[in-house]
Image (cartoon, grey):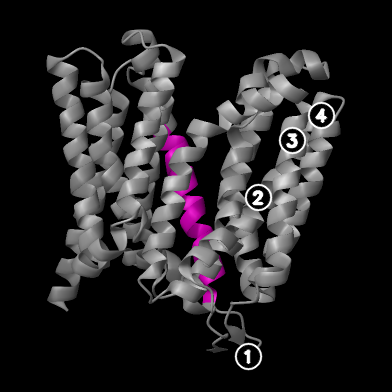
Amino acid sequence: MTTPRPVWAYSLSAALLLMAPFDVLASLAMDIYLPVVPFMPEFLGTTPAMIQLSLSLYMVMLGAGQVIFGPLSDRIGRRPVLLGGTLLFIVSSIGAACATDGTFFVLFRFTQSCGASAALVATFATVRDVYANRPEGAVIYGSFSSILAFVPALGPLIGVVINMAFGWRAIFFSLAIMASAAFVHALFRWHETAPAPVSQKTPSILPIFLSPQFWVYTLGFSTAMGSFFVFFSTAPRVLMEQAGYSPTVFSICFATVAIVMVITTRFVKNIIGRWGISGSLTRGMLLIISGALLLLVGEFYATPSFISFILPMWVIAVGIVFTGAVTANGALAKFDAIAGSAVAFYFCVQSLIVSIVGTLAVIHLNGDTAWPVITYASGMAFIVLSGQFLVRFKKEKN
């Protein structure tokens, strides 16, 4: 049993300004230092494998760590998990900046990912607490999806600028400074939103895994994020190596996909109000399949280019926003009392699917072509649509 907390009085723009920095930082810390990765073994007197570990370990812990911090936020609240995680992120970023050997650098990257994971799960659990039954929630989730598209495109460019001006250590000092600003803002404005327990008994998390709705919407989120991940992983090889685009032209082409997502986010609130959560997920999957089919046509009948590779991704990008705007509410709808735990498993499952299935698609299919995106996007979308059909059939039968 729980009792509700007071509803936030913040406007949508104020809430986004408060929450979005934690989503940005968790993603930005993953790839802002990619441009200096080739030189870091020399800087730190270590091996390339050790530096690669700092990348892989961050990605794994960002998802897996939420399984710890999600239930913790249900027990002690969103605010302490968010603030504690952000403090850990700040200290770890400073530690990484000051590291003098590979072992300590990897250690600080590990703790940095733990801090990012805690802040991220507390942020999304708060969104669930406050906006579960409000249309503004779709705008926030859609905005977060757009952020996840923009950050990988801009992060490395930001890293290049900082490195050229101040050196690689300044990259991690910059992360600490940005996180400090977000921490101070949250310290004064982020009050507790978790339902206050009126009994000492901890609810079971088993219903999360037994819920068909949780799996359908979590797989939908995995489809959306994984489609972008596979596109992100193959686009440089398709457009720069095959189409012959320069890095500048490639960056502009890549950025148009993120721009389409941002534009779509502006309309997503009205769209979901018209079609509902389930209808929006269905249309998101159909758009992703449509984009994959356009990529298939381009693969057979055209050479790699903006028209054959990027324009179909615009269609998929719209589908990603439709999907990302509703999947959290759809997956977590029945778990208000354990929203932190549900959010944690929602992100953990998504991270595992994207990292394993998405990586396998890139490795085992021809990464110089659109085939990895075609296969992942269409295959996962078909599974989600099939799951939706089975859930509806079961409801109608009962």
Image location (x, y in percent) of residue 98:
86, 32
Instruction: Determine which residue is flagged by label 2.
Output: 116
In percent of the image, x 26 and y 40: which residue is there? 316
Disc 2 marks a residue whose amino acid type is Ala
- C-alpha gap between disc 2 and disc 3: 14 Å
Disc 3 marks a residue whose amino acid type is Phe
Camera-nearest residue between 19 and 277: 19
Task: Choose top left, top right, bottom left or bottom right for residue 313.
Answer: top left
Instruction: Determine which residue is flagged by label 1.
Output: 199
Q: Give me the disc on residue 172.
A: 3
Disc 1 to disc 2: CB gap under 8 Å: no
Q: Secondary structure at mark 1?
A: loop
- The C terminus - image quarter: bottom left
What's drawn in magenta, residue-wise?
338-358
Q: Considering only order in the chain, which callout, 2 or 1, is on the residue closer to the N terminus?
A: 2
Camera-nearest residue between 192 and 328: 192
Residue 50 visible in this rendered orientation of the protein:
no
Disc 4 to disc 3: CB gap under 8 Å: no
Q: Pointer 1: residues within 10 angstroms few (<14), some, or many (20+)?
A: few
Instruction: Determine which residue is flagged by label 4.
Output: 103
Name above or below for residue 327 compared with residue 6.
above
- C-alpha gap between disc 1 and disc 4: 45 Å
Image location (x, y in percent) of residue 183:
72, 58
Name above or below for residue 375 compared with residue 138.
above
Q: Secondary structure at mark 2?
A: helix
* Closer mark to the observer between disc 2 and disc 4: 2
In percent of the image, x 81 and y 47: which residue is there? 91
